[in-house]
Image (cartoon, rainbow, N blue to C red):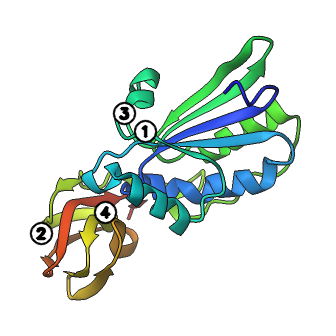
């Protein structure tokens, strides 16, 4: 932070194996492109919650694969995470410059709050423009969403209700979700089922040889 004097700094704690971090990423990229020249600096802090995300090599490959243009600190031992006292992923801190360094302007956990964060960025930078349009229907300001099934450890099969189903996986091989094959080639979080809105269904997940599934995750969807 001492190298970011007079800059507005957004610090984002994230994990490439967590779907909510991946769903937030397009907004961060848009803010970086829109406001970097006006003085915004984004700094990622990668803190892995799943085993594959605790490998520095995996993190470096993921940063390259996801084409992240800002610096990313690798917080494998959760040292920075603990200093900040985080409670979940992603965690978004917006810091405003001050005479003594920086002061915390706002804090947001999880997905959402994109318009609010962008308007705060604009206010601190002294710029004004229309915020980034919602990337997904369930992120619109007037969207009504339903609570999805909680994330499940390992390869889960059974009833669920969600807008989509993702898995945290590593290895080399195939995973089949309700008859649809998904190729696994890198450690990460993979979508296996997607619905136009919140849907109740039965998940049948078959894990092929050479693949390990660490968790099955469920995302928000528009309420029916």
In the image, residue 192 sits, relative to residue 94, either above or below, namely below
x 76%, y 56%: residue: 33
> In the image shown, does 189 or 59 lie closer to the viewer?
59
Mark 3 vs mark 4: give the one in front: 3
- Quadrant including the N terminus: top right
Mark 2 vs mark 1: give the one in front: 1
Give the structural element (helix, strand or loop) at label 4: strand
- Quadrant including the C terminus: bottom left
**Residue closest to the far top:** 100
Q: Is residue 158 left or right of residue 150?
A: left
Query: Circle 2: is it few (<14), some (14-19), or many (20+) Cα within 10 Å?
Result: some
From the image, tell me which residue sits under label 4: 162
- Give the spatial CA distance, label 2 vs label 4: 14 Å
Q: Is residue 50 left or right of residue 65?
A: left
Give the structural element (helix, strand or loop) at label 2: loop
Query: Residue 90: image x %, image y %?
Result: 46, 43
From the image, tell me which residue sits under label 1: 75
From the image, tell me which residue sits under label 3: 78
């Amino acid at each position: 932070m001492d190298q970011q004097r007079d800059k507005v700094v957004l610090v984002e704690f994230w994990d490439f194996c967590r779907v909510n971090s991946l769903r937030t990423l397009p907004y961060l990229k848009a803010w970086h492109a829109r406001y970097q020249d006006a003085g915004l600096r984004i700094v990622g802090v990668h803190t892995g919650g799943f085993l594959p995300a605790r490998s520095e090599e995996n993190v470096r490959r993921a940063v390259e694969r996801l084409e992240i243009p800002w610096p990313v600190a690798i917080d494998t031992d959760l040292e920075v995470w603990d200093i900040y006292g985080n409670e979940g992923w992603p965690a978004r801190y917006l810091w405003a410059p001050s005479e003594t360094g920086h002061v915390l302007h706002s804090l947001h956990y999880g997905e959402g709050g994109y318009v609010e964060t962008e308007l705060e960025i604009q206010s601190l930078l002294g710029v004004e423009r229309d915020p980034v349009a919602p990337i997904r229907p369930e992120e619109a300001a007037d969207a009504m969403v339903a609570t999805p099934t909680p994330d499940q450890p390992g390869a889960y099969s059974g009833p669920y209700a969600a807008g989509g189903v993702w898995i945290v996986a590593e290895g080399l091989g195939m995973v089949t979700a309700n008859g649809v094959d998904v190729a696994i080639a890198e450690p990460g979080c993979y979508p296996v089922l997607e619905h136009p809105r919140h849907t109740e269904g039965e998940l049948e997940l078959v894990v092929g040889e050479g693949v390990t599934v660490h968790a099955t995750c469920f995302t928000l969807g528009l309420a029916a």
